[in-house]
Image (cartoon, helix red, strand yellow):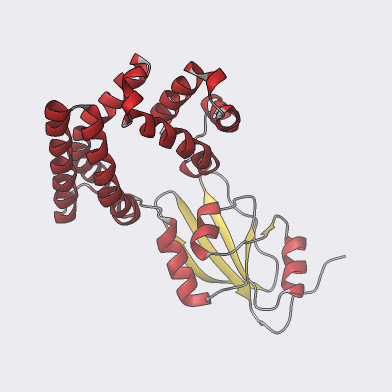
């Protein structure tokens, strides 16, 4: 993503005075540049960057397969060529990732690697015989067919703390909630997978007030790294615990759903 963003930036800046895409470049740069500075880069931090980057990359790919492709900067052409040819490395990379994360290579890993390898070979053959535009068209078609199931189905199986599985277990037991987070940890991926906005309560007093206003509230206390939530106030009992390799989700509810704990003066 970052390499393609740089390529799109380079192409845009090369024709800055001739393109109406200046606003999109500034939009992307206002997100992309701070991400280059901060040390903590989590995957979901890239979500706000996706719309402007997709506009820029789409424009770049349209140019690459058009008749004016020979007018593109050499560095951009080299980046596209490296992307087309380098994708072949994704096939052994899939097997390496499965071995590194799961300590085994499953049948589905071989199937995914084979599909990527075949697509890569087709792209290389077209590149050698018909040139960059034909290879790029085949690459885009292969991406439409292969990347969605890889990202949506295969990649989550490699995530030991996969939030979709946590959300599924929580939803199976508590339905649509209502939910609140308790403590300083807040999980945006869990909100996404539960398909709801979840308020956050940082102190026992806030949690007591939320329970009084929302009967039957389900409290999610997330322990991640060295950051643990405070102990729940009197009246809340542990109802379920979901342990993952890097984090733990403790679920609390009121001992008596019909009555909230008394507030402390």
* Residue visible at 13% across and 26% down in the picture: 128
Residue 207, by quadrant, is bottom right
Q: Is residue 33 above or below residue 143?
A: above
Q: Is residue 93 visible?
A: yes
The answer to which of 93 and 150 lies nearer the viewer is 150
The answer to which of 18 and 115 lies nearer the viewer is 18
Check the picture and name the quadrant holding the C terminus. bottom right
* Residue visible at 49% across and 35% down in the picture: 41
Q: Residue furthest front?
A: 67
Residue 202 image point, x, y percent: 70, 55
Residue 190 image point, x, y percent: 51, 58
Q: Residue furthest bottom?
A: 258
Residue 77 image point, x, y percent: 31, 21
The answer to which of 249 and 156 lies nearer the viewer is 156
Residue 180 image point, x, y percent: 64, 64
Asked whether, in this view, residue 131 is left or right of residue 152, the answer is left
How many marks the image carries: the answer is 0
The answer to which of 16 and 165 lies nearer the viewer is 16
Residue 5, by quadrant, is top left
Q: Is residue 10 above or below residue 26?
A: above
Asked whether, in this view, residue 201 is left or right of residue 225, the answer is right
Q: Is residue 49 above or below residue 206?
A: above
* Residue visible at 55% across and 32% down in the picture: 28
* Residue visible at 44% across and 57% down in the picture: 163
Check the picture and name the quadrant holding the N terminus. top left
């Amino acid at each position: 993503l970052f390499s393609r963003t740089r390529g799109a930036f380079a192409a845009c800046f090369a024709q800055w005075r001739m393109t109406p895409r200046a606003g999109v470049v500034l939009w992307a740069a206002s997100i992309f540049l701070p991400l280059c500075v901060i040390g903590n880069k989590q995957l979901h931090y890239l979500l706000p960057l996706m719309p402007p980057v997709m506009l820029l990359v789409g424009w770049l790919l349209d140019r690459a397969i058009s008749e004016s492709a020979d007018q593109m900067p050499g560095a951009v052409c080299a980046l596209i060529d490296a992307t087309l040819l380098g994708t072949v490395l994704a096939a052994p990379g899939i097997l390496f990732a499965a071995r590194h994360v799961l300590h085994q290579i499953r049948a589905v890993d071989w199937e995914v690697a084979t599909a990527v390898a075949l697509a890569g070979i087709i792209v290389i053959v077209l590149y050698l015989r018909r040139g960059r535009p034909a290879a790029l068209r085949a690459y885009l078609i292969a991406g439409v067919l292969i990347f969605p199931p890889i990202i949506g189905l295969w990649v989550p199986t490699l995530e030991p703390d996969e939030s979709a599985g946590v959300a599924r277990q929580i939803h199976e037991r508590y339905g649509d909630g209502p939910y609140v987070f308790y403590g300083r940890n807040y999980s945006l991926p869990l909100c996404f997978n539960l398909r709801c906005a979840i308020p956050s309560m940082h102190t026992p007093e806030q949690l007591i007030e939320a329970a009084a206003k929302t009967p039957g509230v389900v409290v999610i206390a997330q322990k991640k790294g060295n950051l643990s939530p405070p102990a729940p106030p009197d009246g809340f009992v542990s109802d379920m615990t979901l342990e993952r390799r890097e984090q733990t989700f403790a679920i609390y509810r009121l001992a008596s759903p019909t009555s909230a704990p008394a507030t402390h003066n």
